C-alpha cells in the first residue's frame, strides 16, 4: 500500500526531532512556503547535520534509513509526502525518532534563511 500525506509545520518550528523511516521510502514535495531540510548523510561516521533550503516546488527523496527532519524557522511550511510502502503514523514501522546527538544541530536565523534562498534561487 502507498499513500500521500499532507503535513504542516507552524512558523518558528525549529526543534523537531531527527527521525528515520526504516521500512519505507519517502518522497516529499514542498507545497507551500519555505523551510530547511536537515539530514545526517552518514550517521555511523559523523554527527554533522547538513542543511539545505527547501522552497515551494522542491522535491526531496529519502530512501529507507535516511536520518532527517524539516524545520520552518520563518513561517508555516506545508509538505506533501508519498510513502512506499505506507504505514499508519501510529504503526511502529512508520518511523523511529532519534535522540538528539551532541553536535547534530543546525540553527538558521530568518535572515540567514532568506539569504540562503536568494543564493539558491539566483546562483
Image: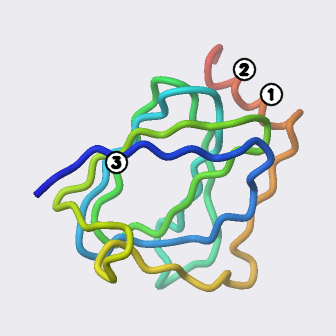
Residue drawn at (62%, 77%), measured in percent from left and top? 47
Residue drawn at (63%, 65%), measured in percent from left and top? 49
Reading the image, the residue beneath label 1 is 115
Do labels 1 and 2 touch, CB within 8 Å? yes
Which disc number belongs to residue 61?
Answer: 3
Pair 1/3: label in front: 3
Do labels 1 and 3 touch, CB within 8 Å? no
Rounded to the nearest whole Å, what is the CA distance between mark 2 and mark 3?
23 Å
Q: Assign the N terminus to one quadrant of the image.
A: bottom left
Which disc number belongs to residue 5?
Answer: none
Q: Assign the C terminus to one quadrant of the image.
A: top right
Pair 2/3: label in front: 3
Q: Is residue 14 left or right of residue 38?
A: right
The picture quadrant where one finds residue 17 is bottom right
Reading the image, the residue beneath label 2 is 118
Residue drawn at (57%, 44%), measured in percent from left and top? 8
The vertical placement of 113 against 71, above or below, is: above
Q: Is residue 62 left or right of residue 52?
A: left
Name the N-terminal-most of marks 1 and 3. 3
Q: Secondary structure at mark 2?
A: helix
Amino acid at each position: 500500500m502507498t499513500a500521500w500525506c499532507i503535513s504542516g509545520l507552524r512558523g518558528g518550528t525549529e526543534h523537531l526531532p531527527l527521525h528515520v523511516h526504516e521500512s519505507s521510502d519517502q518522497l516529499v514535495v514542498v507545497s507551500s512556503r519555505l523551510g530547511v531540510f536537515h539530514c545526517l548523510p552518514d550517521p555511523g561516521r559523523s554527527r554533522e547535520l547538513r542543511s539545505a533550503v527547501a522552497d515551494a516546488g522542491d522535491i526531496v527523496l529519502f530512501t529507507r534509513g535516511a536520518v532527517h527532519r524539516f524545520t520552518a524557522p520563518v513561517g508555516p511550511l506545508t509538505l506533501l509526502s508519498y510513502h512506499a510502502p505506507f504505514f499508519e503514523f501510529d504503526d511502529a514501522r512508520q518511523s523511529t525518532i532519534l535522540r538528539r546527538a551532541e553536535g547534530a544541530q543546525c540553527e538558521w536565523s530568518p535572515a540567514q534563511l532568506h539569504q540562503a534562498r536568494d543564493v539558491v534561487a539566483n546562483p
